[in-house]
Image (cartoon, helix red, strand yellow):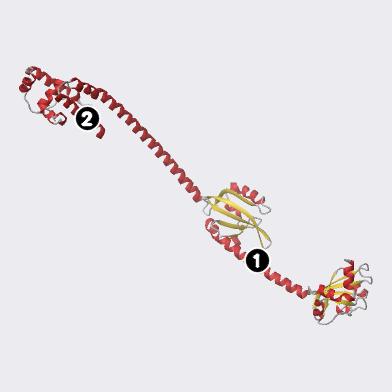
Amino acid sequence: MKETLRNLIEPENKDLFQELTDSFNDVVLFCNNHGVVIKSSIGANKFWECEVTHKTLWSLMEIPVGNINEMLSRYPAGRTSRISLSKKGKCNLWVMPIPQLLASNGGFVATLTPLAELQETYEECLHDNIIARKDSFKLFGALFDAAPDATILVDQDLTILSANPTAMRLFAFSDVENDSISLLTIIKESLRDIVLNGISSLSGGRIWCGELVAVGHSGEEIPVTITVKQVRLSDQLLFQVMLKDLSRRAELEENLKDREEELDSMDNTLRTVIRSVEEEKQEFREEVIGQVKQYLLPTIDRIAEVSSQDLRKSYSGILKSHIEDISENGTEVSDEMLSLSARQLEICKLIQVGMKGKEIAELLNISFETLQSHRKNIRKKLKLCGTKISLAAYLANRIDLDFE
């Protein structure tokens, strides 16, 4: 590095020095130990619009002194000094001595920066920052107003600075910018400490969330979820508070609860109905079994015992008729006809075809008194006693006794 800097200062390395300083437009001057410029950057020549080598540093800086030492006594080396040039205005001057270790005869490096350029650069950056900040405010405002949930901007004292339309409607704010409303006024009193503790815990970009109860403009309680995060606008630390109204959710949950209770009631009712049906089925099953045992099985035995083909057909017809009733209508199988003996059933069939008492007695070779006794027992078994229904009329409606 020592050789490089020494070589740059030596006159024979002008091209190398020029190549190094061509890359920037700042004013850079290399001076010998007497303060005479021996090399300069392109920026220096452009600044003074002339060749500046062989001129003294103080003359270029328009400092009324006679040598470099007097100049440095007024504008010390190693510090930035403010000077004023007649044509260029105010500038910052910085002078650094070159140690003899690096240059045998010593020397100085001087840089000059016009403040007008710094001002223009500063103003350009400031203008860009202002535009960017305005765009940020516009974007923030658009997102703020478009938020579907109540969104409120508060300062570090929790004073409301702004509220979006949803919050304005929900809490009936009128002029939050001038009314100095505290965020805590819209929080249920018993829950305000929770909000204070939550917000005070925020740091490092953290977000605080919770569920609590807000107070509407009419004093009604509103269940909400609260989300708070820090935002920085215009170098001011603020808090963005979002309140999501859970009233609709609570209503839906209540409706769901009512519906569940209704379904439970319907389920209990259905279970009762199913149990009742099962009980009725069991009762019917037991009744059918009882009827089969009481009537059908004895009738089958009678069919097997009687020798008359006609009586077998009669018993079979009655049995078939009632079995069909069971399968089609579920009617009761009990039939008094099945309780008749073979002789009584035979007499019924003869009465049904219209034969008279004496004709039947002669045909069956029994006395008329015996026939009358049979008729009396038949009416009793068929439960016709005490009614005005004649035996012949009853039997006329029994098609299951017809001869095939």
Q: Using the image, tell me which numbered label, if any, was put on residue 272.
A: none
Query: Mark 2 or 1, which is nearer the eye?
Result: 2
In this view, 386 is above or below 148: above
Query: Residue at image x 53%, y 56%?
Result: 170
Name the one closer to the observer, 116 or 12: 12
Q: Crowdedness of circle 1 by 10 Å Cα count: few (<14), some, many (20+)? A: some
Can residue 150 be seen by looking at this rendering?
yes
SS under mark 1: helix
Residue 64 horizontal/vertical position (percent) = 89, 79
User: How many numbered discs sit on the rendered protein?
Assistant: 2
Residue type beneath disc 2: His
Residue in the picture at 89% in, 68% down: 3
Which quadrant holds the C terminus? Answer: top left
Query: In screen coordinates, is 179 left or right of 35?
Result: left
Q: Which mark is residue 133?
A: 1
Residue 77 visible, this angle: no
Residue at the bottom extreme, as displayed: 50
Q: CA distance from mark 2 to mark 1?
A: 99 Å
* Percent coordinates x, y for residue 175 in the rendering: 57, 61
Q: Quadrant of residue 68?
A: bottom right
* Residue 182 spot, x, y in % from top left: 61, 55
Sequence order check: which comes first, mark 2 or mark 1?
A: 1
**Nearer-the-camera pick, 304 or 395:** 304
| Mark 2 secondary-structure assignment | helix
* Crowdedness near tag 2: few (<14), some (14–19) or many (≥20) residues, C-alpha within 10 Å: many
Say above or below: 157 vs 303: below
Q: Residue at x 80, y 79 (%)?
A: 46
Q: Amino acid at mark 1?
A: Arg
Q: Quadrant of residue 29?
A: bottom right
Q: As drawn, is 365 to the left or to the right of 138? A: left
Instruction: Residue under label 2, please give it.
Output: 322
